[in-house]
């Protein structure tokens, strides 16, 4: 695996890694492998996509069950300005800037085209790339993305979600429980992968984000609207949603509106989808990239055409 900690991207020093398989001593760049570019969500970092052993991204790079023509995927992970090890980078801390940074980093890496994988706010970056840089995208994977028309409760002040998130991860006391640790214990009972260690790591990541990252990043999410109608996006898109995520309904609607959208709902996952079900997330991405996924609208179009060709009348709606 080839790991390069930082790159100067649009004037900012950003952390990234490049896991590229090396075959028979050949330079990784000369091997024809599928490049996947991963970007995390608001206040998150590389761990939310599974940088650690056994995580989603790690599985796609290392596990033999996830291979395309015998070859592992090339995994490129980026930590956005203000987050993770890029928290010292200057702003702006917006979806538009993150999209520009993705395009610049991939250009520096010599990638004319790639598959983009974005979680939550990173999913908003995916929407932006699908509308403004479709010639660079082979496909897109949107994991529990912010909806194409912004978050449903988008009027909250930036400090409110910060306090809420810190409480959720057991960092601040919650009045309805004796202590924040009791909340952690309740959460871990509901989702075994949400260990106290994981919740503390998330709370630490949240608390370390700069104030301007919170203000600008949250405003970018609240005001987000894609510049192109969803039903005009022709690029193949996989939408992965968590069954216990509050964004589920909006994610399903967006996917149903996509001309070439594929939907996967993971039963044991919430908004931290890749963390809650790393194997299920990796398997969904692998199937999608291999052409083994099911696009509802494409299927209906095919059925309608074939029924008309055979004179069998209008097809039943699915």
Image (spheres, helix red, strand yellow):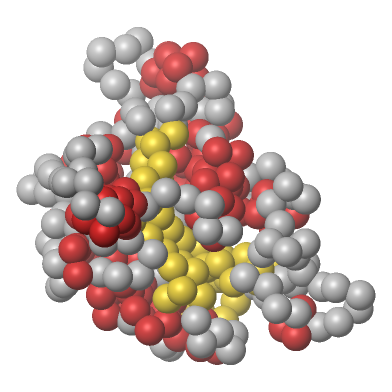
- Specify the farthest residue to the right: 24
Q: Quadrant of residue 278?
A: top right
- Specify the farthest residue to the top: 178
User: Measured along the vertical axis of the image, is residue 223 above or below residue 119?
Assistant: below
Q: Give the tally of numbered discs.
A: 0
Q: Quadrant of residue 219?
A: bottom left
Residue 31 position in % (x across, y down)? 75, 79
- The residue drawn where x is 63% and y is 45% is 55
- The residue drawn where x is 28% and y is 54% is 310
- The residue drawn where x is 68% and y is 73% is 33
Of 77 and 242, nearer the camera is 242
Residue 108 position in % (x across, y down)? 55, 89
Q: In the displayed structure, does residue 282 sit left or right of residue 129?
A: right
User: Measured along the vertical axis of the image, is residue 91 above or below residue 258?
Assistant: below
Residue 233 position in % (x across, y down)? 25, 69
Residue 16 position in % (x across, y down)? 58, 70
- The residue drawn where x is 56% and y is 28% is 193
State whether residue 143 appears in this view.
Answer: no
Pick the quarter of the image with the N terminus.
bottom right
Q: In the displayed structure, does residue 309 sit left or right of residue 139?
A: left
- Specify the farthest residue to the front: 311
């Amino acid at each position: 695996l080839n790991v390069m900690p930082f790159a100067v991207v649009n004037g900012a020093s950003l952390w990234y890694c490049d896991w590229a398989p090396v075959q028979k001593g050949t330079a990784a760049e000369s091997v024809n492998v599928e490049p996947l570019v991963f970007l995390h969500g608001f206040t998150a970092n590389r761990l939310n996509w599974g940088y650690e052993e056994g995580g989603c991204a790690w599985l796609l790079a290392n596990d033999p069950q996830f291979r395309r023509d015998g070859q592992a995927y090339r995994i490129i992970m980026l930590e956005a300005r203000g987050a993770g090890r890029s928290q010292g980078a200057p702003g702006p801390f917006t979806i538009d800037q993150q999209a520009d940074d993705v395009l610049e980093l991939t250009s520096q890496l010599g990638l004319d085209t790639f598959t983009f994988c974005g979680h939550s706010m990173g999913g908003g970056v995916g929407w932006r790339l699908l509308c403004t840089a479709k010639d660079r995208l082979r496909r897109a994977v949107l994991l529990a993305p912010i909806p194409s028309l912004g978050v449903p409760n988008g009027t909250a002040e930036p400090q409110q979600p910060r306090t809420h998130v810190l409480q959720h991860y057991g960092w601040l006391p919650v009045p309805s429980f004796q202590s924040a640790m009791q909340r952690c214990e309740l959460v871990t009972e509901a989702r075994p992968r949400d260990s106290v260690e994981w919740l503390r790591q998330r709370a630490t990541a949240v608390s370390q984000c700069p104030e301007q990252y919170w203000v600008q990043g949250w405003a970018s999410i609240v005001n987000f609207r894609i510049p192109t109608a969803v039903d005009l996006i022709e690029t193949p898109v996989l939408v992965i949603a968590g069954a216990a995520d509050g964004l589920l309904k909006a994610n399903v609607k967006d996917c149903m509106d996509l001309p070439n959208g594929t939907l996967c709902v993971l039963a044991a996952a919430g908004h931290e989808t890749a963390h809650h079900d790393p194997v299920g997330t990796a398997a969904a991405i692998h199937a999608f990239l291999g052409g083994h996924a099911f696009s509802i609208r494409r299927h209906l179009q095919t059925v309608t055409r074939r029924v008309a060709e055979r004179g069998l009348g209008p097809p039943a709606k699915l």
